[in-house]
Amino acid sequence: MTRKKFPIHPARPELICWGCDRYCAADAMACGNGSDRTQHPSELFGPDWAEWEQPTEPPKDKPPQPSDSSTG
């Protein structure tokens, strides 16, 4: 079974539930049991969501810095 290709810039993302491979209409979700639809990433993060770069390495842990505020 082949998976459907995920659309990067759908014309009307608000009309579809993006929570699974069914891409049901927002008013007729087959698997949602009446719950809210899952939004498309462009609705959550903006139209350039697919162009974001993934970090190549995890951020390095820094030791805690001493506080500049004095208590005395």
Image (cartoon, rainbow, N blue to C red):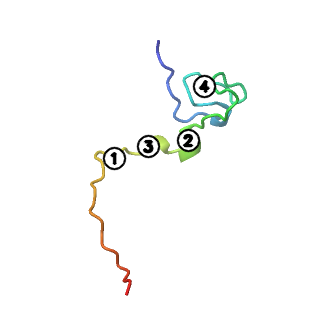
Badge 2: how crowded within 10 Å, few (<14), some, or many (20+)? some
Q: Is residue 27 left or right of residue 54?
A: right
- Give the alpha-carbon distance from disc 2 to disc 3, as whole Å: 11 Å
Residue that mark 4 sits on:
23
Q: Nearer the N terminus, badge 4 or badge 3?
A: 4
Q: Mark 3 packing: few (<14 Cα in 10 Å), some, or many (20+)?
A: few
* 40 in relation to 70, above or below: above
Image spot of residue 1 (x, y percent): 47, 12
- The extreme front residue here reads 72
Residue placed under numbered mark 3 in the picture: 51
Q: Are marks 2 and 3 in contact (CB under 8 Å)?
A: no
Residue lying at 60% horizontally and 25% vertically, measured from the top left: 23
Q: Tell me what residue is drawn at x 70 percent, y 29 percent.
A: 34
Q: Position of residue 57 (x, y in %)?
A: 28, 46
Between the residue at mark 1 and the residue at mark 2, the CA separation in whole angstroms equals 20 Å
Question: Among all residues in the image, which is located at the extreme top?
Answer: 1
Q: What's the CA distance linking mark 3 and mark 1?
A: 13 Å
| Badge 2 or badge 3: first in the primary sequence | 2
> Could you classify mark 4 by the number of other residues whose Cα lies within 10 Å: few (under 14), some (14-19), or many (20 or more)?
some
Amino acid marked by disc 2: Ser
- Alpha-carbon distance for marks 2 and 4? 15 Å
Q: Which residue is mark 1?
A: 55
Quadrant in the picture for residue 43 = top right
As measured in the structure, the alpha-carbon distance from the residue carrying label 4 to the one carrying label 1 is: 29 Å
| Residue hosting label 2 | 42
Residue found 57% across the figure and 45% down from its top: 44
- Which is nearer the eye, 2 or 64? 64
Q: Residues within 10 Å of mark 1 (few under 14, many from 20)?
A: few
